[in-house]
Amino acid sequence: MKNIQRSTEVISISLSRKTAEKLEKVRKLNGQSRSAFISSLIDQNAEEQRWEKIYTRGAQTARQFKITSEEDIDRILHEA
């Protein structure tokens, strides 16, 4: 008999009844299974965190190079 590996992992979570009802309502409106809906929320959150890191790094770089406008960026790019 062949041993088939799963590409998913089963987890168990507890939600308040009110939150579970909201989950059902929203996931049905989106036409998704619970798993697909929760997975999309996790992916969305991870993407938001990634963009927040990018924004933070951009703000740090702007302060470091005293960038306050697009003209400053153009100037820096053409100095090299």
Image (cartoon, rainbow, N blue to C red):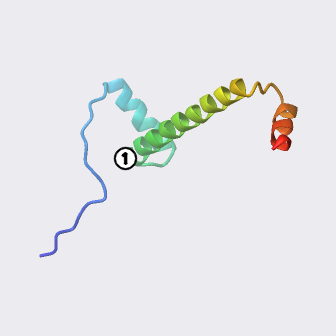
Nearest the viewer among 48 and 64 is 64
Nearest the viewer among 71 and 37 is 71
Residue, x 30% and y 54% (percent of image)?
8
Q: Is residue 43 left or right of residue 2?
A: right
Of the 4 image quadrants, the one containing the N terminus is bottom left
Does residue 20 sit above or below 31 in this rendering? above
Quarter of image, res 64: top right
Q: Position of residue 24 (x, y in %)?
A: 40, 37
Q: Position of residue 62 (x, y in %)?
A: 71, 28
Q: Is residue 11 left or right of residue 63?
A: left
Residue, x 78% and y 27% (percent of image)?
67
Does residue 34 sit above or below 57 in this rendering? below
Of the 4 image quadrants, the one containing the C terminus is top right
Q: Position of residue 66 (x, y in %)?
A: 76, 24
Does residue 7 sit above or below 79 in this rendering? below
Circle 1: residue type: Ser
Q: Is residue 17 left or right of residue 25?
A: left
Q: Position of residue 11 (x, y in %)?
A: 25, 43
Q: Is residue 15 left or right of residue 25?
A: left
Residue, x 23% and y 64% (percent of image)?
5
Residue, x 46% and y 39% (percent of image)?
41
* Helix, strand or loop under label 1: helix
10 Å neighbourhood of mark 1: few (<14), some, or many (≥20)? few
> Would you name the residue on which mark 1 appears?
35
- Residue at the extreme left of the image, as rendered: 1
